[in-house]
Structure formats: structure tokens, C-alpha cells
Image (tube, rainbow, N blue to C red):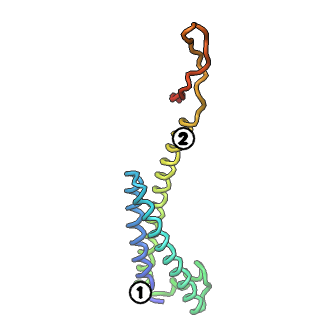
Amino acid sequence: MTTASFEREIALTDNLLELLKREQTSLVKVDVDAMEGLLNEKSRVLQDLNSHTQARYQAVAALGFDANERGLAAWLAVQDDDIKTSWNHFQGLIGQAKEFNRLNGMLINKHFNRNQQVLDTLGRPPASSQFYGPNGQASAGSGLYNTQA
């Protein structure tokens, strides 16, 4: 494994960051069509990142280290500064992607809650107010939904 092995992961993570930024813009604009298109792209990038992660673990295992984060950390500890710098850059990008994902999740929850409130309001039974008919007798309900919360 060399610095070049992290360059592909860095490029994929840059791509993911761009997708997450576009997703955030779509969420703010409530552009459902754009969001749907981004799902496939994000899924592909995440699968590629996962494949590279598995390959990285196999590569460090082939060098005699454990095929996990601890083994990777041990391998990194004996590498030169260029590789460590590349790894740290990659980790910084991953941190940014996690933050964008967290913020986008908050936006999605906000939209979900607003939609749920609208559905709850639309699904309320008719108001049970008493109205007086033309004959002066009380009649139950107007047949309209109560739109006040």
C-alpha cells in the first residue's frame, strides 16, 4: 500500500461530499426529484468506498497486520509522513462527510415532522361543535374539518 491507495479514497470522498452538498441544497429547496436522483449516486459512491476499505484491510493483512482499524493504525505508525498526511487528509474528509450527513438527516427529520403534522391535521375527525339549524334546533357538526391545532 502506498499514498496512491488513499488518493482513490480521497477522490471518492470528495465526490461524496459534493453529493451531500447537493442533497442539502435539494432538501432546503424541497426538490424531491433531485433528491431521488442523488440517492443512486450516493449509494454507488458508498459501495465504492466500502470496497476500498475492504481492500485496504486485506492489504495490511497481507503485510502481517490485523485486518481491522487497529492493524491499519499499526501499519500507519511505521509509514512515512506522506502516507500519514494522505491518511489524515482522508480522515478529515470523512469527518466533513459525517457532519453533512448529520445536518441532512436533521433536515429530513424536519420535513418528516412537518409532513406528519399536515397529515395529522388532515386526518382529524370533523369538529363536534353544535350548530343551530334553520328550525332553531341544535345539530351536531358542520361536516367541515377543524383546521385549528
| Number of numbered discs overlaid on the protein picture | 2
The residue drawn where x is 60% and y is 31% is 125
The residue drawn where x is 51% and y is 44% is 115
Disc 1 crowd, CA 10 A, few/some/many (<14, 14-19, 20+): few
The residue drawn where x is 50% and y is 81% is 52
Which structural element holds mark 1? helix
The residue under label 2 is which amino acid type? Leu
Percent x, y of residue 131: 57, 15
Which structural element holds mark 2? helix
Near-viewer residue (79 or 52): 52
Q: Which residue is mark 1?
A: 4
The residue drawn where x is 39% and y is 77% is 11
Left or right relative to 73: residue 23: left
Percent x, y of residue 4: 41, 86
Left or right relative to 27: residue 66: right
Quote the CA–CA distance across marks 2 and 1: 52 Å
Which label's residue is closer to the chain start, 2 or 1? 1
Percent x, y of residue 82: 40, 84
Q: Which residue is mark 2?
A: 119
The residue under label 1 is which amino acid type? Ala
Near-viewer residue (51 or 136): 136
Near-viewer residue (119 or 47): 119
Q: Which mark is residue 93?
A: none
